[in-house]
Amino acid sequence: MLKAFRNISKTDLQVASDQLWKLFAPHINYLPEDKRKIVELAFLQMVMAHGEMRRKSGEFYIVHPVAAALTLTDMIHLDHLTIAACLLHDVPEDTQVSLKDLSRDFDREIIFLIEGVTKFSSVKYKGEKRYAENIRKMFVAMSKDIRIIFIKLADRIHNLQTLEFVRPDKQYRIALESLEIYAPIADRLGMNEFRGIIEDLAFPYVYPEEYKELVAKSEVEIERRQKITKDILKRAKTILTDKKIHFIKTLGRAKKYYSIYKKMKFKQKKLEEVYDLIALRIITDTTERCYEILSTIHSYFTPLAGRIKDYIAEPKENGYQSIHTTVKDNISGQIVEFQIRTAEMHEYAEFGAAMHWAYKDNGSRYHESDFDPAQYKWIQDVVKIGKQRWFVSNQDYLRRVKIKLYNDRIFVMTPKNDVIELQNGATALDFAFKVHEEVGKKAVMAIINGKPTKLEEKLKNGDQIEIITNKKQNPTIDWLGKVFTSNAIGKIRTLLNREAREKERK
Ligand code: MN
């Protein structure tokens, strides 16, 4: 698709606009005629508003909203209101045409979506304050209509795809924000396809060295596995067909680079130990059939003990459902992961919450009333964090949002081998406060796996930590930068406030 955009005229707006519409129109054929008309009107208004504006790449600006909208039409067949709002998403922020102007032609729902995506002008707030306020605003808007985040994610994907044209310092900031805020939001909404795309686009800008190293290292292994898994899938298909067990399709899908990177880094695995490097998926029609397929797979491939994860009986927090089983193929000796799920679970696994606003292939709509806001209580929680204005800095606020977004955990050990659960991203000082407040506030250094380290050292799964304390030690304001968990932040803040009050009294 990106290639198609390269052929859009760069010199004549009228020609570019015609070409763009010709490219875009077939992608909204899933919408009924009257809805397509509204999308077309949005397109025309968008072209008029942006006019001759250019992007950093030299292209006409109008390419960008269309590119973003195509993500939403092609990946999930989203409803016409979201598509129209996506086309107009940068109009109030970047052109002379205001929301009020747009409200003459478009109904309230579209205007609400556009408003939700629009950032505050730089006049109102500056710098980090502006950034934090925009994130606050985004979550408030999203809590009222979740489609706002679908547009944001599509917008972000195209911005990442064209990030090479942006100033290097901005590149890093945008890519990091994508990994820290947008990918986790997509993850929590079960929109794994979006998450994966965003992560792999941002990865080379945030960790260029690690990215290069991983790609170089994994290329050969991925290719080798692809050959083996293709053969395994072929055999699995034959087995199921022979046994007359119905399945819809099988897929062998390579894991995305950033997911491989995370698994190796946080779970301390070698590339050879990433068994789902290529996930073997079997898609079928009913839940019962999933279990039938599971037991069949187990009678032909040797299951590894303790490696069956039944996310059908126990869905992940974001609603993901599937059965995962790690097995050994006795012919090739390769260990692989099978993922067995129904077609519906499969769609949900890729597009999550967005499915509720999609059109089905047969033209009917998934009903949005199926959407259960209770499942997305965390959005309300994030909104609440934003209302707690007593947090001193915007930095504090953003940190809390990030903590709320990530729900990965790590497990570390005390010198007595007691297991302590912490948020992924926690430091040795977090550990100290988690063990005991007295240990935390008197901490001077840590010994991780026998090696003396600083308190701000980030912990890994399985680390064994000893905290060295000193009676004379007292927390200082810079400790807030050395911790990650809300537990430690809260305790340090209380200690600092108490100390400040005591000083005042003296
Ligand atoms: Mn945009």
Image: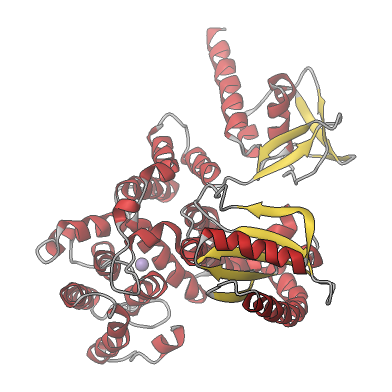
Q: Quadrant of ligand 1?
A: bottom left
Identified at 23% across, 62% down, the residue is 92
Q: Position of residue 191 (x, y in %)?
A: 47, 60
Note whether 14 is above or below 77 in the view shown: below
**Camera-side residue: 381 or 440?**
381
Q: Position of residue 66 (x, y in %)?
A: 33, 77
Check the picture and name the quadrant holding the N terminus: bottom left
**Camera-side residue: 45 or 346?**
346
Q: Is residue 108 visible?
A: yes
**Camera-side residue: 443 or 17?**
17
Residue at the extreme front of the image, as rendered:
243
Note whether 478 is above or below 440 in the view shown: below
Q: Position of residue 285 (x, y in %)?
A: 49, 67
Q: Position of residue 349 (x, y in %)?
A: 51, 61
Q: Residue 115's quadrant in the figure?
A: bottom left
**Camera-side residue: 331 or 272?**
331
